[in-house]
Image: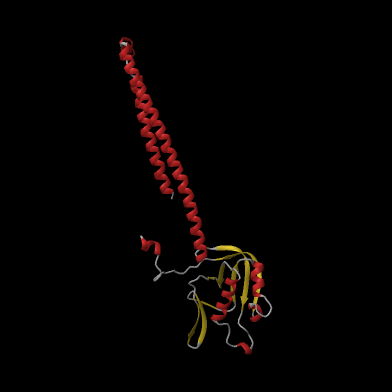
Amino acid sequence: MKKGKGIMTVTIGIICFVLTYVMFMQFKVIEETNITQIETMRESELTEKLASWKEKQEDVEKKLEETKRTLQEYRDKRASNQEATELLNKELLQAQTIAGLTDVKGDGVVITYTDYEDSEHDNGIECYQLQELVNELILAGAEAISINGQRITNLSDIININIDDEVFILVNKNRVTSPYTIKAIGDAQYLESALTLKTVGFVARHPNAKVEKQSNMVINKYTGTIKIKYAKDIVKEEK
């Protein structure tokens, strides 16, 4: 964008210089007319010469007005381009935020979810339980979510992996383990209420989950690679 502004500024400068030079030369021609020659001219010649000077002056004034209009058009276009660029940048930032591609900061809740330590729950937390928690946070209006520092996006995977009879969880293809720290930015009061509803809230159904409100917490951006293989841009296809 800065390069585009620089090119526009240089272009305007060149236009101004050329038109100013033309006007200067017009005036110079008028100034260099021999005064003695004027005194010896007949009335008809003077009238004709005066008409010629007047025509040249009007031409210079016309070019000056055209230059002013051109400069104003450049200014208007530059202002319009700036407004359009600001709007596009704002929309791009919003889209990146929704997609999880930017670091974000705000109020919300932190849920600490740990494996049970008693014999009645020897299987530990599984991926579907984390998926369930994420879905409930989204339904409650969470705008950004992370699990153990892994940003959750619409393309995130939360899966169980079994290797040599050991089961562990992958989030965005990264291993996460208990205790699980889930951050969610949104209306802190509403998020907490949704999770702690009697009998139906996530915390009520999972006593090993604790929730607390937190201010100005940071959720880092998604650091993986997003690849679109099958979805195509309709607008580009139509063109």
Measured along the vertical axis of the image, is residue 173 above or below residue 99?
below
Q: Which residue is drawn at 40% across and 31% down?
A: 64
| x, y percent for residue 109 | 63, 69
Measured along the vertical axis of the image, is residue 56 above or below residue 113?
above
Measured along the vertical axis of the image, is residue 63 above or below residue 88?
above
Q: Residue at x 34, y 15 (%)?
A: 47
Residue 220 or residue 196, whichever sits in front: 196
Residue 94 or residue 1, whichever sits in front: 94
- Figure colour scheme: secondary structure
| x, y percent for residue 57 | 37, 24
| x, y percent for residue 122 | 59, 88
**Outermost residue, bottom side:** 119
| x, y percent for residue 11 | 38, 41
Measured along the vertical axis of the image, is residue 238 above or below residue 15?
below
Q: Residue at x 47, y 51 (%)?
A: 84
For the C terminus, the image quarter is: bottom left
Q: Which residue is drawn at 36% across and 63% down?
A: 237
Numbered circles on residues, count: 0
Residue 222 or residue 129, whichever sits in front: 129
Q: Which quarter of the picture shows residue 231?
A: bottom left
